[in-house]
Image (tube, rainbow, N blue to C red):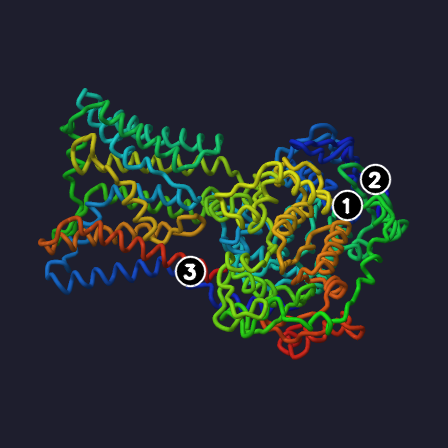
């Protein structure tokens, strides 16, 4: 049989192929950090990295949810609006004097519910995720302004303590509670994707939905689940954002869904689904955060440079994925 | 074969799709410990019967029983859980997942909800060893050939404690050695008492492995026969419903003098065509009215040659002359301008547009050639389409049926019609008869002969040497992405000589065997 030689011939290329995008992101991140350290003395301060996490904790959580969706080959455009809506609802309910615990529960239910509905629409009516979640995006954004046209400040004790609590080391470096929450979300998500049936079904569906169905995997349930998960992550992200800003604003997080998609793709998850890791998404978010930090440190550059750099990187990474994809066949 | 009660029966099964009656009052039974071949032409209803059985489709009428209990599966998962496993014609696995995961996904061994990856890999290795396959179980499935993927699909099916194993054309992409391996496994499973339903187009394989045969024709049951009591010729007659002497008809296909054919200016002459990583540079001339066969193993570069000639891939260098004048074939549009037509081997992905009707599919290439600003009048469309539906015997003979609802062989004919309608001067046919039953195959072979008699040049690619020999004036042999020989099809050329040409010098492969 020739199978023996086939095996030997094929496996040589295996390791790099799957990991190339993530490795590329890691290298990129290290290079950018190196540039920062060599240019600005204060950049080597550990707190700089901690600040990247503090400033982008909510983005990370939302990107984790988006990773699930993109792994199935879908897309969720509603995340930015759901983040804003969650923050708005929390702020409005707190202003009316509702207890913080109850507000948390309600706020955390809104996102997943909307996600569930969108997932059902996508699955049962076979509508493109793009258009369903676009509708979700407009709906949630509209709800924000419906709640209040202006920003609502949050003065609740629990919120302010979550906002100001610092968890640090003796040198004075610290992170916020939001960062810890984000890490927990990352850890749980990585576990779910690697070790549970739900997670593996996500990869299978992203690889080939038709095959997944014929292998007896629950296609519909999994699809609906990923949009619900993305909704939940957006809700958690919204809460974290309200911790961070201590307010709910109707126009906050506009366009955030695009940053999130960019972070996930730069993190090596393939837009057509089936390949990618949560670890890559963490790296993707860090890349975005470090770019912002570099531009802040420079001081003379317009903040729009962030967008220009992200745009170029995104393009480079999609090109990289494409090249790997071609070699795969 | 045991003479116990059937493990599975299907009684009075009927199923219709819009415009097509796929099954009509079909009965079928399957006993434990037998290999039962389900035979029929394309469109006879074999695939539909299997999909009804496994719950992919609902039945319109009829009863299915498993162990005398009526059952109705909601889908393959439920069927599998009940012990009815299927390996479908096209490999239905996820190429992005590892080999081990493809075998176990959906029923991985778990501990407190967590997949035990070590256990998954260990069991996968054990299972593949049982099938004599030496694979890296943690490599992505996509890094292996289609044949290996098919074996992995079978591994997946037999690991589930299956009592009924359905193999829907599992051998169409396997080479002889792999088929032998598969049959060894099938016999092993049969002796363990598993009932195997086996669908194939290869008659020899049926007589090698099957205990009984059920024949379908046009969605109806023809009958059920013990293999020993049904000679091959009667089987074919029952499948196509008429006496079979059509094959003999083309057996003596005018082996016109190659020298006479090659006198004039070649229609297309390429020299030093090639593409790094796909196929080594080659030179080839094709004359009007000439059928050039392209023989070689799967993956030897046959399709790559076709794609270069059609401009679907760009050649790295070399020259082309069309009608003796220097020219180029850099894009499909240029090739079409020169009168080249290309029927892809991958009809589902690169050929038919499943949701369009037969008429729209047939008219597509002609419309493209005319340009979109000059629509073809509807009456002219209907004329042309009717003509080709009749000429190629496309069934159902309804131009408005979506192509999706046609069987594989009939889809292939639609694809052929699409190119024939543009009246190409060189028609490239890449595996036009793969996965097609003998009746449709014969029709397509006859058509190739007629076309070449009418002056059309044909590049005929096929894995079946007999077919290549029967039709070609000249055979180009591919080996390891190289065109190693061009042999005139005179009386001395036979399958053995082509095989020798393919094999000669391939010491490396021999060492592996």
Residue B159 visible in image: no
Q: Is disc 3 placed on a helix, strand or loop? A: helix
Chain at tag 1: B
Residue that extends furthest to the right in the rendered view of this protein: B229
Screen quadrant of the C terminus of chain B: bottom right
- Please tell me how many numbered marks the rendered image carries: 3
Image coords of residue A324 (percent x, y): 42, 60
Residue density around tag 2, few if under 14, some if 14–19, many if 20 or more, within 10 Å: some
**Disc 2 vs disc 1: Cβ atoms closer than 8 Å?**
yes
Tell me the residue at 78%/44% (across/down). B32
Residue at position x 84%, y 42% from top?
A: B224
Label 1 CA crowd tier, 10 Å (few <14, some 14–19, many 20+)? many
Residue A285's label in the rendered image is none
User: Which mark lies nearer to you, 3 or 1?
Assistant: 1
| Residue A28 vertical placement versus A56 (above, below) | below
Residue that label 2 marks: B222
Q: Are marks 3 and 1 in contact (CB under 8 Å)?
A: no
Disc 3 to disc 1, C-alpha distance: 42 Å
Whether marks 3 and 2 lie on the same chain: no
**Whether residue A211 is visible:** yes
The CA span between labels 3 and 2 is 51 Å
| Residue A324 image label | 3
- The residue at which mark 1 appears reads as B40
Identified at 76% across, 69% down, the residue is: B495
């Amino acid at each position: 049989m020739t199978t023996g030689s086939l095996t030997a011939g094929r496996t040589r290329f295996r390791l790099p192929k799957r990991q190339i995008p993530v490795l590329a992101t890691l290298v990129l991140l290290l290079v950018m950090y190196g540039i920062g350290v060599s240019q600005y003395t204060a950049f080597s301060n550990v707190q700089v990295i901690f600040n990247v996490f503090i400033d982008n904790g909510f983005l990370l959580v939302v990107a984790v949810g988006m990773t699930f969706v993109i792994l199935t080959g879908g897309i969720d455009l509603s995340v930015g609006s759901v983040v804003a809506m969650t923050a708005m609802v929390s702020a409005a309910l707190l202003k009316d004097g509702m207890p913080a615990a109850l507000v948390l529960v309600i706020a955390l239910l809104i996102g997943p519910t909307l996600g569930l509905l969108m997932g059902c629409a996508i699955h049962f009516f076979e509508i493109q995720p793009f258009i369903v979640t676009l509708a979700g995006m407009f709906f949630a954004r509209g709800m924000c302004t419906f709640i209040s046209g202006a920003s609502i400040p949050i003065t609740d004790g629990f919120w302010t303590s979550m906002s100001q609590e610092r968890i640090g080391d003796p040198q004075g470096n610290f992170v916020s509670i939001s960062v810890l929450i984000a890490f927990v979300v990352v850890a749980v998500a990585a576990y779910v994707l690697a070790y549970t049936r739900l997670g593996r079904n996500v990869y299978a569906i992203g690889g080939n939905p038709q095959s997944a169905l014929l292998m007896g995997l629950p296609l519909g349930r999994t699809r609906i689940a990923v949009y619900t998960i993305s909704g939940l992550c957006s809700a958690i992200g919204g809460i974290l954002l309200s911790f961070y800003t201590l307010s709910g604003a109707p126009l906050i997080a506009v366009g955030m869904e695009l940053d999130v998609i960019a972070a996930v793709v730069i993190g090596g998850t393939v837009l057509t689904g089936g390949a990618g890791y949560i670890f890559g998404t963490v790296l993707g978010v860090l890349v975005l955060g470090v770019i912002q930090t570099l531009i802040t440190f420079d001081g003379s550059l317009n903040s729009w440079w962030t967008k220009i750099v992200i745009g170029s990187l995104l393009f480079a990474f999609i090109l990289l994925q494409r090249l790997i994809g071609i070699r795969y066949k | 074969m045991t003479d116990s009660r059937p493990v599975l029966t299907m009684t009075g099964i009927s199923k219709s799709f819009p415009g097509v009656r796929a099954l009509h009052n079909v009965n079928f039974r399957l006993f434990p410990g037998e290999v039962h071949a389900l035979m029929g032409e394309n469109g006879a209803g074999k695939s539909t019967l299997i999909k009804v059985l496994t719950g992919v489709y609902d039945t319109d009428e009829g009863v299915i029983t498993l162990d005398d209990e009526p059952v109705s599966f909601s889908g393959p998962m439920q069927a599998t859980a009940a012990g009815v496993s299927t390996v479908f014609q096209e490999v239905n696995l996820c190429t992005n997942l590892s080999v081990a995961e493809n075998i176990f996904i959906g029923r991985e061994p778990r501990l407190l909800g967590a997949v035990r990856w070590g256990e998954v890999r260990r069991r996968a290795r054990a299972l593949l060893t049982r099938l004599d396959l030496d694979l890296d179980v943690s490599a992505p499935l996509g890094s292996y050939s289609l044949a290996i993927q098919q074996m992995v699909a079978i591994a997946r099916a037999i690991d589930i404690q299956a009592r009924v194993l359905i193999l829907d054309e599992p051998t169409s992409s396997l080479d002889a050695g792999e088929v032998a391996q598969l049959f060894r496994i099938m016999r092993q499973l049969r002796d363990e008492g598993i009932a195997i339903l086996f669908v194939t187009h290869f008659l020899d394989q049926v007589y090698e492995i099957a205990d009984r045969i059920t024949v379908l024709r046009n969605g109806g049951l023809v009958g059920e026969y013990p293999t020993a009591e049904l000679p091959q010729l009667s089987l074919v007659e029952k499948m196509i419903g008429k006496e079979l002497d059509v094959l003999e008809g083309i057996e003596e296909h005018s082996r016109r003098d190659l020298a006479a054919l090659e006198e004039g200016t070649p229609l297309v002459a390429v020299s030093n065509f090639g593409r790094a990583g796909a196929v080594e540079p080659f030179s080839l001339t094709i004359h009007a009215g000439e059928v050039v066969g392209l023989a070689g193993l799967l993956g030897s570069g046959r399709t790559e040659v076709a794609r270069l000639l059609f401009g679907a891939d760009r050649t790295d260098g070399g020259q082309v002359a069309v009608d003796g004048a220097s020219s180029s074939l850099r894009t499909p549009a240029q090739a079409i301008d020169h009168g080249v037509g290309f029927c892809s081997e991958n009809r589902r992905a690169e050929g038919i547009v499943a949701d369009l009707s037969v008429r729209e599919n047939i008219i597509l290439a002609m419309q493209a050639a005319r340009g979109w600003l000059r629509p073809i009048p509807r009456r002219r469309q209907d004329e042309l389409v009717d003509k080709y539906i009749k000429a190629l015997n496309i069934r159902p003979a309804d131009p408005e049926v979506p192509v999706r609802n046609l069987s594989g062989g009939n889809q292939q004919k639609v694809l052929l019609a699409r190119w024939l309608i543009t009246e190409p001067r060189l028609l490239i046919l890449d595996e036009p008869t793969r996965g097609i039953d003998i009746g449709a195959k014969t029709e397509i072979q006859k058509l190739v002969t007629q076309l070449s008699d009418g002056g059309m040049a044909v590049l005929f690619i096929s894995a079946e040497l007999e077919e290549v020999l029967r039709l070609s004036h000249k055979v180009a042999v591919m080996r390891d992405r190289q065109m190693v020989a061009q042999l005139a099809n005179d009386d001395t050329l036979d399958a053995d000589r082509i095989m020798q040409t393919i094999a000669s010098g391939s010491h490396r492969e021999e060492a592996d065997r």
